[in-house]
């Protein structure tokens, strides 16, 4: 992972654990992979190998998923660690609110 | 487009008195009023009298709990009757919610029903707050907190009876929703313009924006924090890429959902830096961005004001920073 993005993703995940009220720790390995130990699980977040149609790989035990962006990482990590989580989709109103 | 105002406020906070006054005001003529009452036997509609050119529709059951389609059906029916000439050709609609209603689902109906959106436009949310009991109500009833947090305008009622009790309430309201303008109504008397001219993005002029954001001359909302509800501003010096904004809003909706009571902002979008984009959302539903012709001042920073329940500013800052870092990395790789 590149320096800026590497640090930004780690910081985001650390703040996210607190926001989700999930006790856990995040450790970065030498190759840049982030290991999240929380909720009796170990979730790995790493760059996806070249040639795949996504940028990130998120592994929760044997379960591996691809994510195309930081927001995809968040979704997968939260799904793995927060059993109460139910995703809500953004909706855009059909027209501007013009009185 | 026919503007629709939503009048909310807790039980006994003076909504019906306010509406009764408005319905006698000449500037409120040609208004269709929908009164939503909780319980099978409603009374409020008997307590207000419409002028000849305005009329009242009654709905029972709580709009926010019952099938939301009821509201859409009522509005569609009103429009059909207007087209057929069987009702006054009303020029605006006012919806009085029941005192126990959460306004958010009502706003979602108005914002996201494609059929309604072709003809009706949400003009704003006005919440009445009882100056005498308002503070205690806010302490005890989460619905009242949400009504205040979602309002564009707060109308303090019964001030004539309060005898100086209003200072703590004013501070609490400022903490919950510093972006909403506060007005006093004496015996329900208030200018009708305050219901329909609340400064929604499409009707804003550039110089109105700082006040609409609650950032008039400041970088952050002036208020402190409520134990559960917080209001804060996020500033970005550099223009924000459109894709970063999209990802940010998606993540906000996805992870905050119902806790994101309101997000509004003025943004410097990198692809169109000379025209500020105004965004406005309630929970996970957002209006499309409105592009203004010019910036209100030389300050071209992006400013987002968030009112939310248990949403941490530091998390939002980290989220947008990570998204921007990724967008920058992708752009650098593609260059």
Image: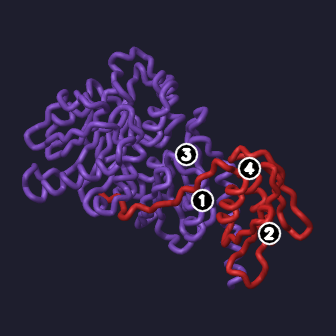
Q: Which residue is identified by label 1?
A: B251
Which x, y percent locates residue B202?
36, 59
Marks 4/1: CA distance? 15 Å
Mark 4 or mark 2: which comes first in sequence? 4
Q: Is residue A96 left or right of residue B79?
A: right
Q: Which mark is residue A46?
A: 2
Residue at mark 1: chain: B
Between B1 and B165, the one lying in front of the other is B1
Marks 2 and 3 close (CB-CB < 8 Å): no
| Element type at mark 4 | helix
Between B19 and B201, the one lying in front of the other is B19
Between A66 and B33, the one lying in front of the other is A66
Marks 4/3: CA distance? 17 Å
Label 1 environment density (alpha carbons within 10 Å; few <14, some 14–19, many ≥20): many
Q: Is residue B255 left or right of residue A55?
A: left
Residue at mark 4: chain: A
Marks 2/1: CA distance? 20 Å
Q: Which residue is identified by label 3?
A: B259
| Element type at mark 1 | helix
Q: Is residue B86 left or right of residue A2?
A: left
The colour style of the image is: by chain
Height in image: A75 above or below A20?
Answer: below
């Amino acid at each position: 992972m590149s320096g800026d993005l590497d640090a930004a993703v780690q910081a985001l995940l650390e703040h996210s654990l607190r926001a989700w009220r999930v006790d856990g720790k995040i450790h970065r390995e030498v190759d840049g992979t982030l290991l999240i130990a929380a909720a009796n699980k170990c979730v790995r977040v790493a760059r996806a190998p070249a040639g795949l149609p996504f940028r990130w790989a998120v592994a929760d035990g044997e379960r591996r998923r691809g994510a195309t962006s930081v927001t995809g990482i968040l979704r997968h990590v939260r799904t793995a660690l927060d059993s109460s989580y139910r995703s809500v989709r953004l909706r855009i109103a059909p027209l501007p609110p013009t009185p | 487009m026919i503007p629709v105002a939503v009048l909310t406020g807790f039980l006994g906070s003076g909504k019906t008195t306010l509406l009764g006054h408005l319905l006698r005001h000449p500037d409120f003529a040609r208004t269709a009023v929908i009164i939503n009452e909780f319980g099978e036997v409603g009374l409020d509609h008997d307590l207000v009298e419409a002028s000849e050119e305005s009329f009242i529709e009654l709905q029972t059951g709580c709009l926010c709990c019952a099938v939301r389609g009821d509201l859409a059906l009522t509005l569609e029916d009103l429009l059909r009757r207007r087209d057929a000439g069987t009702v006054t050709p009303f020029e605006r609609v006012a919806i009085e919610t029941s005192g126990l209603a959460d306004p958010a689902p009502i706003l979602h109906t108005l914002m996201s029903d494609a059929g309604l959106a072709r003809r009706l436009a949400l003009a704003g949310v006005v919440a009445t707050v009882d100056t005498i009991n308002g503070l205690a109500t806010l302490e005890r009833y989460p619905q009242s907190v949400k009504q205040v947090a979602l309002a564009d305008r707060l109308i303090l009622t019964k001030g004539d009876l309060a005898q100086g009790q209003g200072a703590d309430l004013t501070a609490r309201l400022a903490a919950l929703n510093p972006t909403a303008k506060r007005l006093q109504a004496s015996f329900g008397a208030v200018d009708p313009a305050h219901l329909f001219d609340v400064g929604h993005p499409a009707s804003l002029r550039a110089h109105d924006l700082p006040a609409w954001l609650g950032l008039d001359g400041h970088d952050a909302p002036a208020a402190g924090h409520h134990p559960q509800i917080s209001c804060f501003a996020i500033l970005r010096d550099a223009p924000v890429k459109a894709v970063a904004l999209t990802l940010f809003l998606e993540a906000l909706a996805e992870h905050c959902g119902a806790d994101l009571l309101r997000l509004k902002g003025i943004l410097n979008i990198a692809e169109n830096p000379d025209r500020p984009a105004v965004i406005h959302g309630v929970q996970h539903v957002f209006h499309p961005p409105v592009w203004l012709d010019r910036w209100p001042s030389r300050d071209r920073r992006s400013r987002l004001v968030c009112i939310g329940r248990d949403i941490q500013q530091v998390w939002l800052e980290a989220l947008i920073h990570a998204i921007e870092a990724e967008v920058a990395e992708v752009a650098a790789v593609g260059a």
